[in-house]
Image (cartoon, helix red, strand yellow):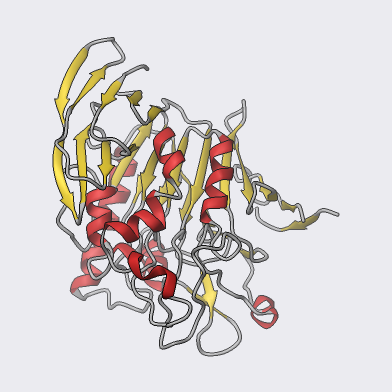
Amino acid sequence: MKKLLGVAAIAIISVSCAHNSMTYVGMANEGQSFVKTVTAKDVECKSVSVESTDRKFSSIQMEKLKFDESTVCQASLPKDAAVVRSTNGVINIPTAPKKIVIMGDTGCRLKNKNGKGPIQNCDDEKEWPFSRLMRSAEKENADLIIHVGDYHYREECTDPVKCKNFQGTLGYGYKPWEADFLAPAGNVLRQKPWIFVRGNHEDCNRAHEGFDKLLSPVGEEKCVDAQETRYTSFGDFLIVNFDNATVDDKPVEAKSEAGKALRERYKKMVETINARPEKEVWLVTHRPIWGLAPSWSGPGVSPVNINMEAITRELPLPKKVKMVYAGHVHAFQIAQGNHPTEMIIGESGTALDYFSPEAMKLVPPGHTIFPADHGYALLERDVNGKWKASIKSYDGETDFICQISEPGIPCQIFK
């Protein structure tokens, strides 16, 4: 029985780097989208052959980076690139995506706080289902994949029994990144373009080197507190990637250096969105603006990031921002109110957050926290230009369907 919850050009790039390598595409600003080939071996990088939409050819030499024992070959893509072809597969870059997969918080949690909290068995797809979810996502044949941050969770593990099998994939080097993200996401990385949002697990105190070298545009190998905002345009449709990985969940004084820096970046983003010609805008970020988390001080729920919430009250997002997508909280949520609808998708692999029955009773109006499940979101645009979100679980089953282009229409729950 269904329940209801209230909520409202062709360019060819030939890549050759090494046997058993992986080639993938990251979307960013015009001229900053990139192609990278990663291999565990020390190899020399080759050039890429580019065919533009007007069928002009050029050759671009890939530059070489070292990340731990791996080699990263990379090059920026020309703005009119539309297909990337390599020995690892063919990647089509859409001019107007109609099907988008969004996921977040995918890594295997091995580190717990003060000996408390879950340690996942990374070898068990029931405990850490990221590989299962990626196999399902591959079948969706989406035009674009968006990851809203937190790829890397294998920082350390001290339990002598539970950690025994994972000692070789701990830390911040290549092997943890390969185990936590590159390997399970490999088939989809080779086939589809991605937008990579930076999570707090990839900040300058944690797994920043892997994110900077593997998932950031060319030339951004040095960690910064906040990466520049990315504007990826698809005609009249714009996806804005705002880095709030280091925006503390605890209150930050507005006049502090951190508070002023955040406001300056946010204001610049709003001004840029207003000045751009696109009519429909999605904002993707890691920390939610209006999300809720289980309260640490007792039964109940607490706002996730009051700093982001406060700044949007001071300077609301432009009206053409139709949706906000975030992660960070490991449960599917929708937040509505006097702001764009926000969808929180932080349940794509890591241990889920638990909202007790008592906490669920205290969820304020405008917020919907859905039953705990791992999954991802599939966004599909219909012939009228309206978006529908299907929230999929472990093996591609549909848990919920939400008509996100029409706030107020209830989500249907398929369980």
For residue 129, which quarter of the picture?
Answer: bottom right
Q: Give the x, y percent position of residue 287.
A: 41, 63
Q: Give the image location of residue 127, x and y in percent.
A: 57, 66
Left/right of residue 352 with respect to residue 55 in the rendered view? right
Residue at the image position 58 percent from the left and 61 percent from the top = 332
Q: Residue at x 82, y 53 (%)?
A: 2
Quarter the C terminus occupies: bottom right
- In percent of width and height, residue 106 lies at 46, 58
| Image location (x, y in percent) of residue 15 | 26, 27
Res. 203 visible in picture = yes
What residue is drawn where x is 59% and y is 44%?
Answer: 136
Residue 339 falls left or right of residue 95: right
- The residue nearer to you, when weighing 298 against 77, is 77
Of 59 and 67, nearer the camera is 67
Residue 246 relative to residue 378: left or right: left
**Vertical placement of residue 60 versus 231, above or below:** above
Quadrant containing the N terminus in the rendered view: bottom right
Extreme right residue here? Answer: 1
Above or below, 165 relative to 213: below
